[in-house]
Image: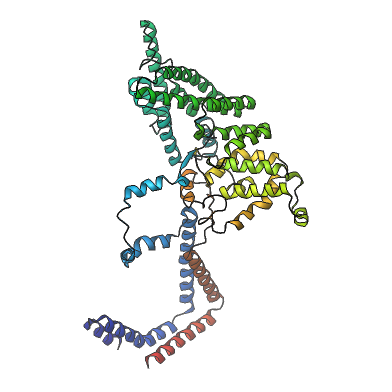
Amino acid sequence: MCVQFFVQCCSIKTPLCVSVLLVKSWFFCLPTVTVFLSTLTPKFYFALTVTSSFISGLIFVFEWWHFRKYGTSFIEQVSVSHLRPLIGGVENSPPAPAAFSAGENEANRQNMPECKMWRNPLNLFRGAEYSRYMWVTGKEPLTYYDMNLSAQDHQNFFTCDTDALRPSDTVMQKAWRERNPQARIKAAYQALELNNDLLLLSCSSNNWVICGSLPCYSCATAYVLLAEEEATTIVDAERYFKQALKAGELIYRRSQNCHSQSPQHEAQLRRDTNVLVYVKRRLAMCARKLGRIRESVKMMRDLMKEFPLLSMLNIHENLLEALLELQAYADVQAVLAKYDDISLPKSAAICYTAALLKARAVSERFSPETAFKRGLSTAEINAVEAIHRAVEFNPHVPKYLLEMKSLVLPPEHILKRGDSEAVAYAFFHLQHWKRIEGALHLLHCTWEGTFRMIPYPLEKGHLFYPYPSCTETADRELLPTFHEVSVYPQKELPFFIHFTAGLCSCSAMLALLTHQFPELMVVFAKAVSMVSALSAQDRRF
């Protein structure tokens, strides 16, 4: 009878008739299938449930791993990108307006301030710190994306159009583009040798050039590269930077005398200014790391006075950290009064340092029980509001300050309000929070209250703009793979993770019951088969 219905289905071309006949054939064949299932042994049911549980368990584990690593469900991603076009999902979507071209979309995406990568003001030295970490642990602390951004920064800071007129700068221009660290170091030595040869040639001919392409006493950028990448200690790095400072100051003075002659000389002056500021800043950081903190503070203050227009380099964040190490809290407050302005861009260092100073005034005597009974004082309210403000700006920082998450070496670039900025801040400022008694306890008691004020952070903020949704993807590019990126707001588990987990659990439970009670489960399977067969016959008649 099943064969007859199947032949009829093949002879009819109308889709509706075919579907009706297929349903009828299923009803006629159902008793035969029921008889076949009733003859199966308990071993078959046990093998079936175990196999189903194993396969669904594998799918669940893969889904969980994919979600933790990439933040999305693999099944949902495949469904959206591959299955939806097949079922006509793309055709139903409205076409994009012609006014928004791909180039404009890319430009708009690049102009989004929340997705901009910033140079880490407190970034470590590659040779003296990052490389030593890799030698000890065998883990690469910097990602390729982060190092590529640094290479672009070096080319913007340390090169200009007139480099082709000087052989040593031409070599350094190529060195900044090299991917291999040893090739960069070799090129730096080559630039120094070329520069020394030109210097000897000029001395022998007594032909000193004051404004032009030949020659400089030394190649400052070559010493910068050696200090950053070849020096294995901070002392060695400082020695290289001092040599770079001598060369940089001489080149800067010459560029000042010539900058008005042509646009090329103006570009050279900007490059020489960048080199000089970079070298002085790194020398101040070397002094801070070697314990000469007051000297470091003086160097940073002088640098900020000499080049006040370069505030975008965030030298004040280096100054804040050094002043906190000196426990000069009045000076810290004076720096915050200048830079914690509504018209200036914020950072985790600004917001959390302001919260730390206000928490310092009340943290030593703060008690949650006492505050609950008598209420918060004015100073305590100010401290709590400052903490809420800081947490709203970057919600990832408290987990690192409270040591709920482990720290890694900070990257060379950060994303403001992202996990990378939180790692960079906590890496240098955790000790300052621990030094103030009760500050971390106050933070622990109050930081989660911020989220009650912003129930939908991606849509509306309280004191700042809504939290950007691009931070997770960018932070995964900046932070090493062995670090678990902090995600805010927390994503709900995808449906397919719940589904595969439930399917695996149910299959495992059926397998266990079949193994423990084989006869009872066979009776149960037969009963289910009989009920389904009777219900099918009732629907047929």
The spot of residue 177 in percent (x, y) is 38, 32
Instruction: Examine the rendered structure and indicate whether residue 477 appears above or below residue 3.
Output: above
Could you say which is closer to the camera, residue 522 or residue 154? 154
Quadrant assignment for the C terminus: bottom left
Q: Residue at x 46, y 18 (%)?
A: 247
Drawn side of residue 480 relative to residue 325, left or right: left
Q: Position of residue 59 (x, y in %)?
A: 46, 63
Asked which quadrant contains residue 13, the reply is bottom left
Question: Closest to the observer: 414 or 233?
Answer: 414
Residue drawn 36% across the image and 87% down it: 27
**Relative to 336, residue 270 above or below:** above
Residue 423, image x and y in percent?
Answer: 56, 43
- Image quadrant of residue 364? top right
Residue 77 visible (yes or no): yes
Measuring from the top left, give residue 517's x and y in whole percent.
Answer: 56, 78
- Left or right: where 213 falls relative to 302: left
- Residue 291 in sight: no
What colour scheme has been applied to the protein in the rendered image?
Answer: rainbow
The N terminus lies in quadrant:
bottom left
- Seen from this angle, which residue lies furthest front? 343
Q: How many marks?
A: 0
Which quarter of the figure has residue 79?
bottom left
Residue toward you, 122 or 51: 122
- Residue visible at 53% across and 30% down in the picture: 128
